[in-house]
Image (tube, helix red, strand yellow):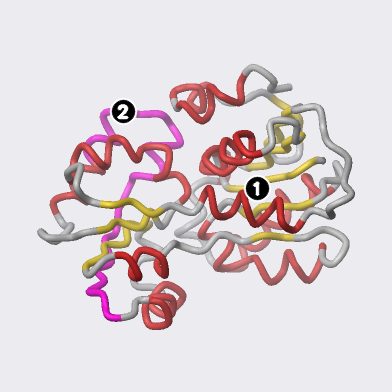
């Protein structure tokens, strides 16, 4: 079994670690293009082009499923990737966990990138899945870039800024960018331990395994890292997060 994940950068680590926990034997391919980050401010056409490049590089290694472990790419490029790669390669997108958060909480804050916050896509998800909860959108400028660099001072500053704009009494926070799942502990420390967190990594990993054909033979636990289609090692910043350390011992 081989499962590929694509993202602009290391935001895919959370879903990759979730997959490794569920299926230690699965071969994982991590395909990203960190030199092109950030994707959010780019035109939709650029995002689609970059996402397709990462997806094609991963698909060349013949995985059994492809996870789009990036909210921005899922918004702008998921349809294009599915049109090109399915049905031969199942493509699984990432959607902010607004539905389960709203079902479990009366007040929800969605932490997301400035490009996603207030977007028609996210507003549509809130309208469809927000239910009776009070939902607040909280833009987190600079947080994804700080996570990508492993810059702890910049992470702390961006988290503190977003926490200050999160309404008092918020019962749940939706992590609307895959990079944010890597710093959930820092966010929790800033907003309080009583707030529930809803990410996408575990649900996406489970869905990817459901999409793999049941007779697919097991893998060997191999990890392959691609940057702009070229095989490389996990970047140093990835090793500053527990998810990256869990994967590092078998990285190519």
Q: Residue furthest top?
A: 249
Q: Give coordinates of residue 120: x percent, y percent.
A: 43, 79
When the figure is inspected, residue 219 is found, relative to residue 143, above or below; the finding is above
Separation of marks 2 and 1 at Cα, in angstroms: 24 Å
- Work out which quarter of the rendered image holds the C terminus and state it: top right
Q: Report the magenta residues as a range.
A: 132-157
**Dot 2: within a 10 Å radius of its alpha carbon, few (fewer than 14), some, or many (20 or more) residues?**
some
For mark 1, what is the residue?
Answer: 6
Return the mark for residue 152. Answer: 2
Q: Residue furthest left?
A: 168
Residue 110 lies in quadrant: bottom left
In the image, 183: left or right of 47?
left
Whichever of labels 2 and 1 marks the residue nearer the N terminus, that label is 1
- Work out which quarter of the rendered image holds the N terminus and state it: top right
**Dot 1: within a 10 Å radius of its alpha carbon, few (fewer than 14), some, or many (20 or more) residues?**
many
Residue shown at the point (48%, 26%) measured from the top left? 237
Label 1 sits on a secondary structure element that is strand
Return the mark for residue 234. Answer: none
When the figure is inspected, residue 38 is found, relative to residue 101, above or below; the finding is above
Q: Give coordinates of residue 63: x percent, y percent.
A: 82, 46
When the figure is inspected, residue 118 is found, relative to residue 145, above or below; the finding is below
Label 2 sits on a secondary structure element that is helix
The question of residue 218 being in magenta is answered with: no
Foreground: 147 or 106? 106
């Amino acid at each position: 079994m081989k499962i590929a994940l694509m993202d602009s950068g290391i935001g895919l680590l959370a879903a990759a670690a979730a997959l490794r926990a569920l299926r230690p034997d699965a071969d994982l391919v991590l395909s990203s293009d960190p030199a092109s980050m950030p994707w959010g401010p780019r035109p939709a056409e650029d995002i689609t082009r970059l996402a397709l490049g990462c997806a094609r590089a991963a698909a060349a290694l013949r995985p059994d499923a492809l996870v789009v472990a990036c909210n921005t790419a899922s918004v702008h490029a998921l349809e294009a990737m599915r049109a090109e790669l399915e049905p031969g390669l199942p493509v699984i997108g990432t959607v902010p966990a607004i539905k389960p958060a709203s079902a479990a909480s009366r007040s929800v804050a969605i932490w997301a990138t400035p490009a996603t916050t207030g977007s028609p896509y996210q507003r549509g998800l809130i309208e469809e899945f927000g239910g009776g909860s009070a939902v607040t959108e909280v833009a987190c400028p600079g947080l994804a870039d700080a996570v990508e660099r492993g810059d702890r001072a910049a992470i702390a500053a961006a988290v503190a800024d977003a926490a200050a704009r999160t309404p008092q009494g918020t019962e749940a926070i939706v992590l609307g960018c895959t990079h944010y799942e890597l710093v959930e502990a820092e966010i929790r420390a800033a907003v309080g331990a009583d707030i529930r967190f809803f990410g996408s990594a575990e649900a996406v990993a489970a869905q990817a395994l459901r999409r793999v054909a049941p007779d697919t033979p097991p893998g060997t636990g191999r990890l392959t890292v691609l940057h702009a289609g070229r095989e490389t090692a996990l970047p140093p910043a990835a090793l500053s997060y527990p998810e990256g350390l869990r994967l590092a011992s078998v990285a190519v």
